[in-house]
Structures are given as structure tokens and as C-alpha cells.
Amino acid sequence: MSRMLSGQDAVTLFFAENGKEGLECLTNQDIDVMFLDLTMPVMDGFEVLQVLSAREHETKTIILSADVQRQAMERCIELGAHHFLPKPFDPEHLMSVLNKLGIYVVEGLDNSVPHQAGDEFIQAFKEVANVALGRGAAIISDHFGEFIKMPLPNVAKLCAGELEMAIDDIKQQSESVAIAQRFVGGGIHGEALVCLRGKDVGVFGARLGFSQVDEHKSEIVIDIANLMVSSFLVSLSEQMNIPFSVRQPIVLEDYMVWGDGECIKSELFTVEYTYEADSLDLECDVLFMMDNSSTLVIKKIMETLH
């Protein structure tokens, strides 16, 4: 978006890394239009809208977010946002929205994606993962009927020692249940770890239509974990044009990740996030891990995305 708007003669851009900085910018500058994300550190988009609604302001607010839950959109409009643009945004849609606000931009400016050197593809994939998280949350919310708190995904490389510590930490949490599920597609091989905790896991599962079959093996947790993984992979598949298939999820205590307890010598490419139910005592930690050969495939795809 910044590449699209930075070449416009009538446009001056200001940037803020979180809601607090955004409010400071609004205090110091006469801003006509603010593009506001919802998921941010320090102060999120909902908090910014709440502050703005408590005072008079002329700034038009356009939400630009991967959180496409119906409840999120409705909450934004109720708090005074003028429009909601889902990520990834459509340039023609953006221009139409700006035109309605009396701001006219020139078509045909360079909007190409620059070549990504080194590990810059990780940042690009973080945005892809962010969109997948938002669409996944919307799928879960549609099933659940209530708002799901959406985080920023942590995309990074993880060494074998860090993975071993993470698995040991999960196993030692007596009040949580961990599920492992493998997935594959388009040269990408990976495994997802899902850890559910909170006293309302059963309530959450019941609202999703799952029934408890074996309380000791927590089949309801397996069903929920499968939904968490598949909802993310569906959006990832659409964006990367790769069909993914998944194996049956298994309780972690019965299954050692990556099989045979074999030591992993190379780094893993990981995506980590936590979903929280807005009205229930429930948290769901999800860790997607992909091997070194998968990293090369992801990097190549990120270089071709526009």
C-alpha cells in the first residue's frame, strides 16, 4: 500500500508501528485518512477506535486487517470506522474507497514486489500467515458463534534444541492437552503442534458440535485441534496455490514429533500463535514446523507473490 500511495503528488504518508504511536501522530498532524490495523502491539486497533470515539475528530478511519471475523467488522463500524478493507487488499477496491472520501490517486504507478534477499522472505511470509490466521479465526468464529481474539503470528527459524524444550514444556503442563498433526503439499513437509488449555475446552467443543467420547484421550480436543490446523492451512493453500493434505491428529503423549526421536540437525521454519476465546476460559497454542527443504520452497513462492 505504501508503494502504491507514496508516488502520489497529493498524498503525504505518516507511519506508526502501533496504536499508541498512531494516536500521537493524530495529535501532531492533520490527518485526513488513517489506515488502521487491528492486531498490533502496545495498543491494538479496537483500543484506538475506542479512544477516537470519545473525542471529536475529522479523520476518516479505514480498517486494513486480516481479522475478517464478522464480529470484528461489526465492532469496528460500531466504534466509528468508515470502511473495512480485508488483507490482502484489492488496489481497485482501495481506489474506489478513497474516491468516495474525495481522495483521487493516479493509476498505473509501480506496485511490483521487490526482490527479497536473505531472510526478507520471512517478513513476506509473516503477512501471508497473518492473513491465514485471520481467515482461520473467521472460520472458527462462524462455527463457534463468538469472537476469537487474534494474535500477531511469530514467524522464525527454530533450532533442534529450542524445539525439544518446547515439546518438554508442553508435556509438563498437566492441565493442557497437546496434539500433533502432520501435513504435506507442494514440496512442503511439516507438523503442527496444538496445545489446548482452560476449563472451558469441553464447552468450546460442544458449541462447535463436537462430542466427548473418551475423556482420558480427549477426543474432543483432537477434533478442535484438527479444526485449528485445517482452518489455517485452507487459507495458506489459497494464497500460495498449494493443496495441503493432513494426517489424522494424535495425542502428543502417544507420539514423538518427527518420528523415532531422531535428532534434528537443521533449523526448522516455524509459525507460532495463540487463539483465545473472547467469552470462555480457553487458550489454544499452535506451532507449525516445516523442515529445511520446505523453507526453500516457501522462499521461492514468496518471491513470486504480488
Image (cartoon, rainbow, N blue to C red):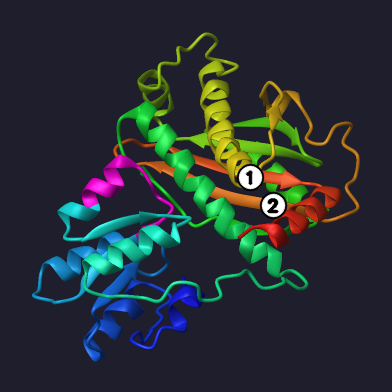
- In the picture provided, is 252 more to the left or to the right than 30? right
- In the picture provided, is 111 more to the left or to the right than 263? left
> In whole angstroms, how far apart are the C-alphas of marks 2 and 1?
7 Å
Res. 111 image quadrant:
bottom right
| Picture coordinates of residue 154, whole percent (x, y) | 59, 58
What segment is highlighted magenta in the picture? 64-75
Can residue 51 be seen? yes
In what quadrant of the picture does the C terminus appear?
bottom right
Q: Nearer the viewer, residue 144 or 171?
A: 144
Amino acid on which the number 2 mark rests in the picture: Thr
Number of residues whose C-alpha sits closer than 10 Å to that of mark 1, classed few (under 14), some (14–19) or many (20 or more): many
Which residue is located at x 58 percent, y 27 percent? Answer: 226
Which residue is located at x 91 percent, y 52 percent? Answer: 265
Q: Nearer the viewer, residue 158 or 10?
A: 10
Q: Give above or below for 265 relative to 11.
A: above
Circle 1 residue: 287
Can residue 48 be seen? no
Circle 2 residue: 270
| Picture coordinates of residue 41, whole percent (x, y) | 42, 67
Which residue is located at x 72 percent, y 45 percent? Answer: 289
